Structure formats: structure tokens, C-alpha cells
Image (spheres, rainbow, N blue to C red):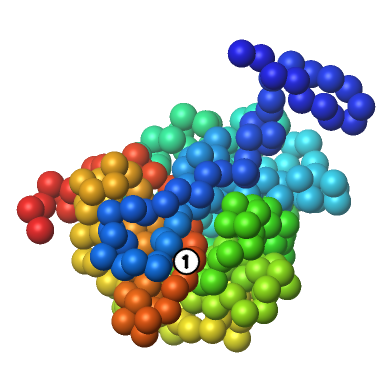
């Protein structure tokens, strides 16, 4: 069925890729929290974005502001470092809006992500897997410095349009979808934009909301897209003082949760989403033990479709 979209006073049939970003569902995790009466555990299903992840939000905000400010002009490449999802969002937008995209990506990014980027026509510069996302950042900075006329360096890790996307959209959607009943917010740290922007806005709406950030438990981990801040290049947009609490998640725990969600909730999510849920469940169990009720919201960053080549899905434990 065709729908009408109103833009600048005109009426068009259908909707654009940009129109479909945001307003994602909030889903209840019924079975994993069934042993915790009084606790409501909810996940923001960001795989419903057209690019398949939460990163559609900051990528579109970065692109639209860069175009409005004359930084991303016809002929220039958008350049950035990515672990995959932001790059996919950039590539999708570049294809839809007509600008070339060059991405620096660790070579151990999942095969599915590389194939999706190629399908959108992005130029990919692979970096040393041992250097993780930090190696991709260093390469992007090098390319931008060598040829500033060719590239607009989007710099998702240092661009305020990243966190502002979540301040303007994600937080307000969560507030409305929970009818203002949210008591706790949990999100992992990569660029940190999701946590920074959502937390800042939720605090304005209700200063009593507890906001908990999460990072991997070591610098060597399988939580693709997340950063262990003590040893990483710390994103300029990251402010550790915003969190009421910083928790850590192990790779093994995230893998176990990903498989559990598939088998108990009918929900296939990515590894960082599974780490978010595992962390939120720890918070829920602590609150239940203390005899408290709560509405806990976390971010389901993406679905499992870009991780199905990982061996852990076939492991028995």
C-alpha cells in the first residue's frame, strides 16, 4: 500500500530511506526476565532501521548536517573509520543521496559486513585486525590529512552530530514508548554516542533515571563495535562522568545471551545487543534482590544477520 509523505509543502507517494530511520519498536523480553516479578526489561529494536542498525541515526545526522554546512559537497568522498554498522549506514546513504563513500575497516570485520558494504558500492580500506577500531581511526586520519580536498572526514568518534542524533530521537522515543515510566537505561560504549545522547536527554526528562554504561571486560574481546576505554583511543565525544555506573561484559557472556535469545525469545540479535541485554539483566537481578520494581531499557543495536558466520552459534554451550 502506498503512503503519502509531506515534505516542504509538497506531497509524495511512498517514503525515502531517510524517512524510515527511527521510530523503532520497543520489545519486551518476556522469558529471560520471567524470574524477576516487578521488573520490566525492554529492548529498542534498532534492526528495524533501513540500514539494519542503531547507527543509521548518527550517520544520517552527520551526513545531513555536513551537506547543510557545505562540508560534504558534490564530488567529495565521505570518509570515516568504522567497525561495520556506521559504515553500512554511510554506504546506504551515499547510494541513496549520490555521494561516494570511503571506509577504513578492520580486516577481521565479519564477512557479512564486508559483503553489504560492497553491495552498496563503498570503497573499503582494510586495516590490521590487531589494531581494532583504533587502527581504522588512525588510517582515516592519515587519508584525510593527505588529501583534504578529496575527503570529508565524518569522524563519528568526535562529531557532536553523533550523540545529538540520540538526544533528538532515541531518548524521546524511549520516553514516549514507556509513558515516562523508564527507571534505568543501559547501553554499551563504542563511539559512545548512543549512551551520551540518550542519557543527556533522559536526564532532562527525569533526573532520577539511572543510566548505566557498559564496556568489554578486556581490550582483547569479541564484542565487535565496543571499546575497552582504558586502553582505547577515547572518543572525543565521550564523557565518563555522565554514567551513574560503568559495568563490564565478557565476550562469552554475550555469546551465551545471543544464543539464549534466539532459543527463548525468538529474537536473533548481534553480539553487542546481547552484551547490552546481559548487562541489563544483571541490573534487573540486583534490583529484584533489593526488593525494587523497575522499567529497564537497553539498545538492541542490530540483528544477528551480520554475525551468523561466527562459530559460537554452533557451539553447544
Question: Residue 224 sits in which quadrant?
Answer: bottom left
> Neighbour class for label 1 at 10 Å: few (<14), some, many (≥20)?
many
Count of marks, rendered view: 1
The residue furthest left is 316
Helix, strand or loop for disc 1 = strand
The residue furthest top is 1
Residue at numbered disc 1: 296
Q: Specify the quadrant that holds the C terminus.
A: bottom left
Vertical arrangement, residue 207 with respect to residue 66, above or below: below
> Would residue 87 be visible to someone looking at this image?
no
- The answer to whether residue 216 is left or right of residue 313 is right
Say which residue appears at 48% left-offset and 84% top-offset. Answer: 245
- Looking at the picture, tell me which residue is in the foreground, 151 or 186: 186
On the image, the x and y values in percent for residue 236 come to: 63, 75
- The answer to whether residue 232 is left or right of residue 279 is right
On the image, the x and y values in percent for residue 196 come to: 62, 70
Say which residue appears at 45% left-offset and 82% top-offset. Answer: 246
- Looking at the picture, tell me which residue is in the foreground, 181 or 190: 181
Say which residue appears at 53% left-offset and 31% top-offset. Answer: 121
On the image, the x and y values in percent for residue 307 come to: 30, 46
- Looking at the picture, tell me which residue is in the foreground, 171 or 37: 37
- Looking at the picture, tell me which residue is in the foreground, 91 or 313: 313
Vertical arrangement, residue 81 with respect to residue 47, above or below: below
Vertical arrangement, residue 294 with respect to residue 91, above or below: below
Vertical arrangement, residue 197 with respect to residue 308, above or below: below
The residue furthest right is 9
Q: Specify the quadrant that holds the N terminus.
A: top right
- The answer to whether residue 303 is left or right of residue 295 is left
Amino acid at each position: 500500500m502506498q503512503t503519502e509523505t509531506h515534505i516542504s509543502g509538497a506531497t509524495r507517494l511512498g517514503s525515502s530511506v531517510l524517512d524510515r530511520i527511527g521510530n523503532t519498536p520497543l520489545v519486551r523480553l518476556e522469558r529471560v526476565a520471567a524470574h524477576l516479578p516487578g521488573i520490566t526489561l525492554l529492548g529498542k529494536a534498532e534492526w528495524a532501521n533501513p540500514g539494519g542498525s542503531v547507527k543509521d541515526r548518527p550517520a544520517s545526522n552527520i551526513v545531513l548536517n555536513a551537506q547543510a554546512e557545505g562540508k560534504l559537497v558534490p564530488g567529495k568522498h565521505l570518509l570515516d573509520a568504522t567497525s561495520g554498522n556506521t559504515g553500512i549506514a554511510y554506504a546506504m546513504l551515499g547510494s541513496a543521496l549520490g555521494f561516494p563513500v570511503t571506509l577504513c575497516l578492520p580486516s577481521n570485520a565479519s564477512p557479512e559486513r564486508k559483503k553489504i558494504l560492497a553491495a552498496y558500492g563503498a570503497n573499503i580500506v582494510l586495516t590490521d585486525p590487531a589494531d581494532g577500531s583504533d587502527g581504522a581511526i588512525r588510517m582515516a586520519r592519515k587519508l584525510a590529512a593527505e588529501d583534504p580536498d578529496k575527503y570529508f572526514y565524518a569522524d563519528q568518534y568526535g562529531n557532536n552530530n553523533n550523540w545529538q542524533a540520540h538526544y533528538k530521537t532515541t531518548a524521546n522515543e524511549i520516553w514516549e514508548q514507556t509513558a515516562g515510566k523508564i527507571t534505568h537505561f543501559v547501553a554499551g560504549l563504542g563511539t559512545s554516542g548512543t549512551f551520551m545522547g540518550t542519557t543527556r536527554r533522559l536526564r532532562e526528562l527525569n533526573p532520577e533515571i539511572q543510566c548505566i554504561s557498559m564496556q568489554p571486560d578486556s581490550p582483547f574481546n569479541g564484542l565487535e563495535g565496543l571499546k575497552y576505554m582504558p586502553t582505547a583511543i577515547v572518543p572525543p565525544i565521550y564523557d565518563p562522568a555522565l554514567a551513574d555506573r560503568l559495568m563490564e561484559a565478557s565476550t562469552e557472556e554475550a555469546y551465551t545471551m545471543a544464543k539464549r535469545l534466539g532459543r527463548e525469545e525468538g529474537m536473533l540479535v548481534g553480539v553487542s545487543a546481547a552484551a547490552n541485554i546481559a548487562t541489563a539483566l544483571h541490573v534487573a537481578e540486583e534490583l529484584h534482590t533489593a526488593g525494587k520494581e523497575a522499567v529497564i531499557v537497553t539498545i538492541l543495536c542490530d540483528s544477528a544477520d551480520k554475525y551468523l558466520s561466527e562459530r559460537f552459534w554452533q557451539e553447544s554451550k
